[in-house]
Image (cartoon, rainbow, N blue to C red):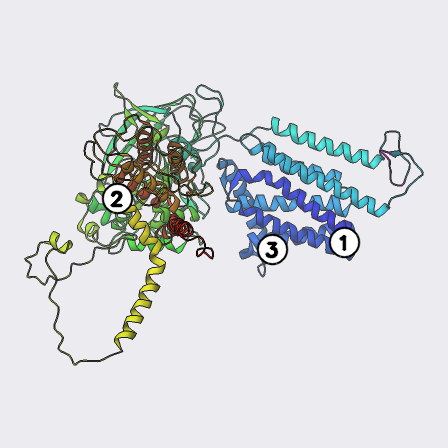
Amino acid sequence: MSGRARLAVCAMVATLSAACALLPLVEPIGWMFQAATLLGLVIVAGALARRVPLARPLTVAAQALIGLLLLTLLFTRGQAVAGVLPGPDAFHEFGQLLQEGTSDVGRYAIPAPVTTGIRLLLVGGVVVIGLIVDALAVTYRSAAPAGLPLLALYSVAAGLAKDGAGWLWFLVAAAGYLLLLLAEGRDRLSRWGRVFGGGPTTAGRPYAAGPVPPGGAPAPIRTGRRIGALALGIALVVPAVLPSLSGGLLDMSGRGGAGSAGGTISAVNPLVSLQDSLNQPEDREVLNYRTTTPDTRDLYLRIVALDQFDGAAWKPSQRTVVDVPDRLPDPPGLAPDVDTTAVNTSVSAAQWYAQNWLPMPYPASRVDLPGRWRFEPEGRTLVGDRGQNTRGARYQVESLIVRPTARQLADAPRPRPALRREYTRVPDSLPPVVERTARQVTRGARSDYAKAVRLQDWFALRGGFTYNTEVRAGSGTRAIERFLQQKQGFCVHFAFSMAAMARTLGIPARVAVGFTPGGKRADGSYSVGLKDAHAWPEVYFEGVGWTRFEPTPSRGSVPDYTVTADAPDEAASGRAEPLPGRTAAPEPAPSTDGGTCPPDQRRVAECGALPQASGGGPADDGPAPGAVAAGALAALLVLLLPAIPLLWRIRSRARRLARNRAAPPGFRGSAHSAAGSPRSSRPSSRPSDSRAGGSGPLTGVAAIGSAGAGSPPGGADPRPAVLGPWRELVDSGWDYGIVPDDALTPRKAAERIVRVGELTGPAAEAAHRVAGAVEQALYAPRPEATPGLADDVRRVRTGLHAAASRAQRLRALLAPPSAARLLWSVSARASALVGRLRTAAPGRSAPL
């Protein structure tokens, strides 16, 4: 590789190293691969231009043209001439994307979703910086000043990150820059060559040609060192003085805790900040209010409506804001025949809670508050102007509680075309499974209302979904697809998924973010805390307007108009149909005993054999019996061999859990085997394997043996009744990818299964109960049996199954990794048999 080619590669590496500091700012990181590809093509174009050779300005111009064509192909292909050549429409689209990207940077908290605008800023910025670095270092052969654009790229990341870009990213960027300087020095040396003599040496090595200055190093080297040191020094100082963006829409943490003067929120990320709010260990009060309505179930405090779905995230549309009128306009689509109740609410915001959207009941009719606020009519939200926020705000809101009937919603006419077109738009990247699932769930429903109720009930009741705030937040198409597969998430997953599915059915939908009504105090006021942060879908019905639905289980309140008892017949007509993921029960076979055999006896085959039908057809000799038997045996082997791991796991699970079903004499609640204390039968390089009552891992207790105490007097040893379920729990974790670690104690092993398996609620509690029972059985002076461990193990296994992917579930069922214990058991028995043979007949068993 020539010196210039090596220098060009180092210029690209240095640029990408500095760009790595941008990775924590957004997710996912696929944009980096696009930027690397485009930058590589620009670098190759420069290398070809220099080989022609072109003049230096023409080389840079050619690279810039190639970069523009590549960006056009990637971002504005639809507006370009022939899909590649940028014309006026393409440049207009570039302007729109840059404007959207700049707005998104200010809207989203870190890590922000990679919207199209943000992706253009990232990819385009890296390409431009890389072009400048290549021009300085390679075309103009001056690598030291190339550190300044690299510094600019790193400083942007350091300034936007919450706590700076971090020392690791600084080291990566600095290493890329130093590599570029080293490559330039080698290139200069290779062009001048080494000249020995004619000057002093340092450490026995002569300098290159030219006089040596008194400073000890040639002037170009000293200059490069100074520029490099200056650039690195600025890179250390600039991140310390640049301000960083604060949190998102529901980021109530502030900057200094309660009472801090910081924490003003100027960005929106309902995914990240809402999840952070729900996972806060302390439920700090955000708002408190008094209201004139005695029933606050529908008094949700709405902040903003997210009505634009571009595939990367849900976000509010950019609309015109106006001065707050004395009385807000009537809610869109609300007819006079719908029952409404006027409500007055007085709200006080906490001093530490500062964000620029005003929480208030929907739909508000009048708002009385001081400060600089603006009104957005479409979403009916109030937003602060010129730094105005909610910190310590006190305000009065007059609003309506809208109570439509199910019949009014079911008979609602179709919305006007413009509204329907805007609020049913979905991105092309939305996976087909979303629409397919929506149509399966709503099959048989004849109105938009009936379909919306079906979707809500499927998420909240019948779809097998679990509420879990630990699941990674996300509202893009991939997050929705992942949520429909794993069926675990929190309110944003339920709201975004239902709204997207409703849109695929042609039902206008959007997502609202805010707070649930909170809890009532003794003085009659209501307190709203961090954990009341919530997201819910709104569906539009002509004559009623935007209507709240509640698909999130165990959160908020289900509106009365969506309850089955209030729904018209068509909403409940198809509820018995099988839903995706659920199989309808098979129809019972016709009885041949005249109906005299009870169903429970028929299930356990206590009614005797069914009469066989008499054959009246002609006899057929068919193939020979031997051939039939051989074929049947071969088919049986083919079917049974792959099923051996599955069958062995079923049998071992039944044997282990059966010990905990009935109490041994003299103890409370647990059956047991007469087997003694566990003994390790496997080498330490594998998870420990006890032979007591069948194989199984004894993670953390395999080496304990009979430590603790012997069998208590007057009764059998209860420990096998505890260790059997423990072995099954650890093997269940192994089946779902959590390999046993026999260096851990039972308690640590249970914590690892809960953490890695993402267990929550009853499943996590069950795992800890089993571990506690194991410690009690092994260490207590008088161990006692613990009832209910078999049920606890089943809860843990159910939790692991729910959190696993489809591939993990299939592997756990058909090829469980813990079935390796069967091979270990066979190997151990074979080794024991060989040992006995050698002992009995040393000479004859030598070949073995």
For the question of whether residue 422 can be seen, the reply is no
Dot 1 falls on a residue whose secondary structure is: helix
Of tags 2 and 3, the one toward the viewer is: 2
Q: Closer to the camera, 103 or 600? A: 600
- Where is residue 50 shown, x and y percent of the image? 76, 54
Dot 2 falls on a residue whose secondary structure is: helix
Of tags 3 and 1, the one toward the viewer is: 1
Dot 3 falls on a residue whose secondary structure is: loop
> Magenta span: helix, strand or loop, mainly?
loop
Neighbor class of circle 2 (other Cα within 10 Å; few <14, some 14-19, many 20+) is: some
- Where is residue 500 shown, x and y percent of the image? 37, 48
- The number of discs equals 3
Magenta-span inclusion, residue 204: yes
> Residues under labels 3 and 1: Cα distance?
28 Å
Of tags 2 and 1, the one toward the viewer is: 2
Q: Closer to the camera, 450 or 293? A: 450
Q: Residue at x 18, y 43 (%)?
A: 566
Task: Say which quadrant the C terminus sits in.
Answer: bottom left
Are the residues flagged by discs 2 and 1 in contact, CB closer than 8 Å?
A: no
Disc nearer the start of the sequence (3/1): 1
> Residues under labels 2 and 1: Cα distance?
67 Å
Residue type, label 3: Gly
Q: Is residue 688 left or right of residue 615?
A: right
Q: What residue is disc 3 on?
A: 87
In the image, which disc is placed on residue 461?
2
Q: Closer to the camera, 392 or 743? A: 743
Q: What residue is disc 1 on?
A: 50
In the image, which disc is placed on residue 245?
none
Disc nearer the start of the sequence (2/1): 1
Residue type, label 1: Arg
The stretch in magenta equals 202-209
- Where is residue 404 shown, x and y percent of the image? 23, 41
